[in-house]
Structure formats: structure tokens, C-alpha cells
Image: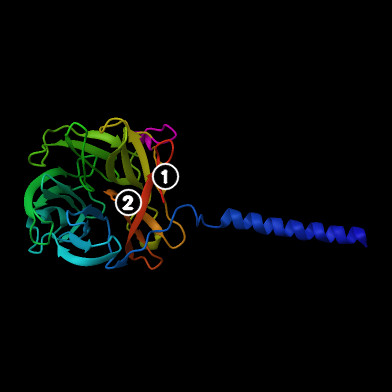
Amino acid sequence: MGTSWKATLRRALLTVAVVLTTTVATAPHAAAYPLPGRVTGDISVHDPSVVKRANGSYLVAHTGTNIALKTSTDRVAFRNAGSVFPGGASWTTPYTDGSTNLWAPDLSYRDGRYWLYYSASTFGSNRSAIFLATSPSGDSGTWTHRGLVVETRTSDNFNAIDPDLVVDDQGRWWLSFGSFWSGIKMVALNPSTGLRSDSAVRSVAGRNGGPIEAPNIVKRGAYYYLFVSFDHCCRGASSTYRVVVGRSTSVTGPYVARDGTAMTSGGGTEVLAGQGSVHGPGHQDVLADADGDVLTYHYYTDSGASRLGINLLAHDSAGWPFLR
């Protein structure tokens, strides 16, 4: 009787162990990253870039018809604010096959005005261009076209989309950009015009032709941090976008991941990835705010809709960023 009971108990415990092991092995990493913070209102965005205005409100520029705009007074409730070019942007159509859908703006405020770098292209093509516009207020219809900054042709091995402006400690202006092909590039800009200052093109990250795009560089402490998006965007709930980061003491690199792998050799330390009903988070932008750094990005819901994601960003004891 005793032996039979023990055997039955052993079989039951083994069954429980197998079930638990299977569950742990196959369950999604639902607690790997914090979920997006609470946002409400008009939060249908793609490729967001955010700036805080002098009055304490927030201005968001994102991919859309003639570059879409949204505003918020509290970084929670957002509303539609029109577009950058309500009258159209005819200079972009040679790169978009006539479409008015303009991509991946980078928004900043410097020297008393708003600066906007943005992309014109078609999906899968590197016949692309990055343009600059400026505005005294950031409001719809107040933007002035300032010219072409970078363009690529099908004969080039890189792609002029996804711009990001960074100003280094010496006051020099740099524009990083890129998608797929040979990776993330960087060019120098003239601070007085915001346009390109020379013909040099530097490489700062790449995956040997694999999916990498959407650079964003910020200086914190002794390091410049280069955030990029790995893997695939724009597939709704099937998107595999994720955010990784590397760092360097020089704005032009070399950037390395936490494990020491160069970002030009595919390195990158993961900061955010999909989990549960949050699919393909990426195209990130770091904003310095009163309560610390904020990471803004887009992600996809189970239905495939793109949404605005916002989380606070902190650094660990070794200086590496993480979401909170």
C-alpha cells in the first residue's frame, strides 16, 4: 500500500514538473519590459518624434500626410494638430511616386526655432531624400522649406531616410540616418543653415545588409548613446521591431554594445522588444523632460494598429539605459 502510494505521488510530481517546465519554456516574456505608459486621445502614430515647448506642452511629429502633428499639455492626452505642410510638399514627390505620405520626422528646438528633418521615399527603395524645414512656432502651416539635405539613388549602398539630429559637445551638428543596405550613416551639417557641410559619409552601425534603421543619438554623462531599431517594421501585429543601443565617447563612434561588440558589426544591447499585446516597438526618440529621460516610440496592437508608446528611461550602475 505504502509503495503504491509513493509511486503514484512520484508520477504526479513528475507530471506537474513537466507541465511547469513546458509552461516556462513556451510562455511569452510578458514581464521582460514595462508596458507602455498611459496615453489617451489621438494616439495613432508611426515614427514619432517629440519636443517640449517653452509653455510646457508637447509637440509630436510623425509619419503621415505631409508630416502629421499632434499636441499634448501633459504627455498623456494627445490631440490632432494638423500637418506640417497643409498646402503640400511638391518638392518631395519625385521620391514618393507622387504620394503625400512623408516619413520619419526628427523634431527639435534650437536657436529660437523648431527644426524638422524628414524623409521622402517609397517602401523598399533607396531612391530617397531627407529634407529640412524650420518654424518659429511648430504649428501647422508655419513651416518653411529649407532644402535638400541628403539623397540616395538606387546605385548607392545606403538609404537616406530616418534622419536624426545631434549636436556634440563642441557645438558641431551631425545628422545620422539610414535603413537596411549598408546600415546607419552620419554626415556633418552647417549649424547656421542646418544643411550638409561636406561630402563625407561616415558609417556608425550596420548588420551586413540586415534590418537596422531609425537612429537616435543622445549625450548622457561621458557617453553618446546610439539607439536603433533592429528587425522588421510595418507588418502590423507580425512586426518584429525592437530597440537596441550602443555607446561611444565620440559622436562619430565607434559605438559598442554592452558585450563589447561593435555596432558596425551588428552589435546592440536590447532595450525594448515586443511582448504580449505590444508588437514590434521601435522608431524610438529620447526626450529630456522634467521627470527624466523619456523614450517615445510606436508599437502595434493585436489588430495591427500603430500606437504611441511612452516610457521613462533610466541608466543602471554601469551607465546602460533601461526602461522603467
Furthest residue in direction right, as rendered: 1
Name the image quarter holding residue 270.
Answer: top left
Instruction: Characterize the local packing of mark 1: few (<14), some (14-19) or many (20 or more) Cα atoms within 10 angstroms.
Output: some
**Main SS of residues in magenta:** loop
What residue is shown at x 28% (from left), y 44% (from top)? 215
Taking the spot 28% from the left edge, 41% from the top edge, the residue there is 218
> Is 41 placed left or right of 95 in the picture?
right
* Residue 41: x %, y % from top left: 28, 69
Vertical order, 21 against 157 (above or below): below
Q: Which residue is mark 1?
A: 270
Q: Is residue 144 magenta?
A: no
The kind of secondary structure element at disc 2 is loop
Report crowding for label 2: few under 14, some 14 to 19, many 20 or more residues within 10 A (C-alpha): few
Q: Tell me, for residue 291, which label it has, or none.
A: 2
Q: Nearer the viewer, residue 40 or 178?
A: 40
**In magenta stretch: residue 264:** yes
Q: Which residues are magenta?
A: 257-266
Determine the image quadrant of residue 69. bottom left
Q: Nearer the viewer, mark 2 or mark 1?
A: 2
Q: Nearer the viewer, residue 45 or 303?
A: 45
How far apart in space, not on screen, are marks 2 and 1 (Cα)?
23 Å
Give coordinates of residue 302: x percent, y percent. 41, 66
Left or right of residue 314, residue 29 in this image: right
